[in-house]
Image (cartoon, grey):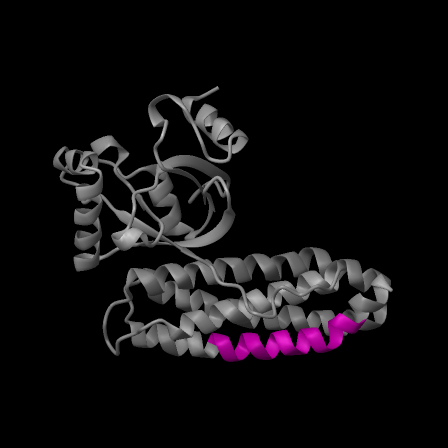
Amino acid sequence: MSFNQAVIEEFRANAGRVGGPFEGAGLILLTTTGARSGREHTTPLGRPRGPGGQGMYVVGSAGGSDRHPDWYRNLLARPLVRVETGTEVYEAVAVPAEGARREELFAHIVREEPGYGEYQRKTRRVIPVVELQRTHEAEDAGSAEDGIAGMLTRVHGWLRAQIAELLRLPAGESAPVGMQLRQHCLAFCQTLEAHHTGEDTGLFPWLAERHPQLAGFFRRLEEEHRDIERTQTRIAGLIRGGGDQAAVREELEALSRELLAHLDREEADLLPVLRALAA
């Protein structure tokens, strides 16, 4: 068993408490998705305190190596991560701090834990500070409804809440896309893509076998998925190609209109079928 795996197992067995060199240290487990492999990777990381004890941060120190740690490269490609604190497990969007904000946070962290300053002196690489911003669920996302219908309404509630959060993020008229907008956009689009893929390859074929009269309806939903995917692809292209925030905001507004109309149509026609199956 690797050293990291031993720490992970001890962490999970003891509500976040571990012994050895990490005894008494604030640790979390961060699970990222491999940028190339698509597989989950869990890493024990220090949990430095933010200003005023607020926020959840991790530092990509890698012991002062000249190479960013793998978990950091993973979250740049796939920003949606899972955080385990010992008492909680939750989903978050990983957002590296930029510019003056990064300098302010790193200086604070070094005052609290000077070892990070030693790591920075060992490398010319700017050691990243990453904020783990907990995703927010819609107020109505906690549906008490059971079965597939309940699952669908909860997922749709989450998607509605996240697109609303995206549109509330600040965006300049001609400034390059910042990390906050970049990471939240990528996390949302990746989650939406996974949801639609699950419907197209799992839920819809399963329902079409039981309700052949709805085959045309499912084809229309799949066509809408492809239309939404094209908008997502444009957004990802703008983000990765250095487009400005105004262009991304315009595409996000288009995505919001498409998505909300799609979710409303899907629920209107699909939820009665799902509820009847559960009856």
- Residue 22 sits in quarter: top left
Percent of width and height locating residue 7: 44, 27
| Residue at the image point whose x is 14% and y is 33% from the top | 122
Q: Is residue 33 visible?
A: no
Percent of width and height locating residue 76: 35, 50
Task: Name the dominant secondary structure of the magenta segment.
Answer: helix
Q: For the image shown, how many numbered marks are present on the structure?
A: 0
Is the residue 219 above or below the residue 57 in the image? below
- Left or right side of 124 for 87: right
Nearer to us in this view, 177 or 106 = 106
In magenta stretch: residue 271: yes
Is the residue 178 above or below the residue 122 in the image? below
- Residue 208 sits in quarter: bottom right
| Residue at the image point whose x is 18% and y is 54% from the top | 104
In magenta stretch: residue 260: yes
Percent of width and height locating residue 188: 47, 62
- Residue 220 sits in quarter: bottom right
- Left or right side of 252 for 9: right
Q: Is residue 253 visible?
A: yes
Nearer to us in this view, 55 or 119 = 55
| Magenta stretch in the rendered image | 255-272
Percent of width and height locating residue 229: 52, 67
The C terminus appears in which quarter of the rendering? bottom right
- Left or right side of 234 for 52: left
Nearer to us in this view, 190 or 127 = 127
| Residue at the image point whose x is 27% and y is 48% from the top | 129
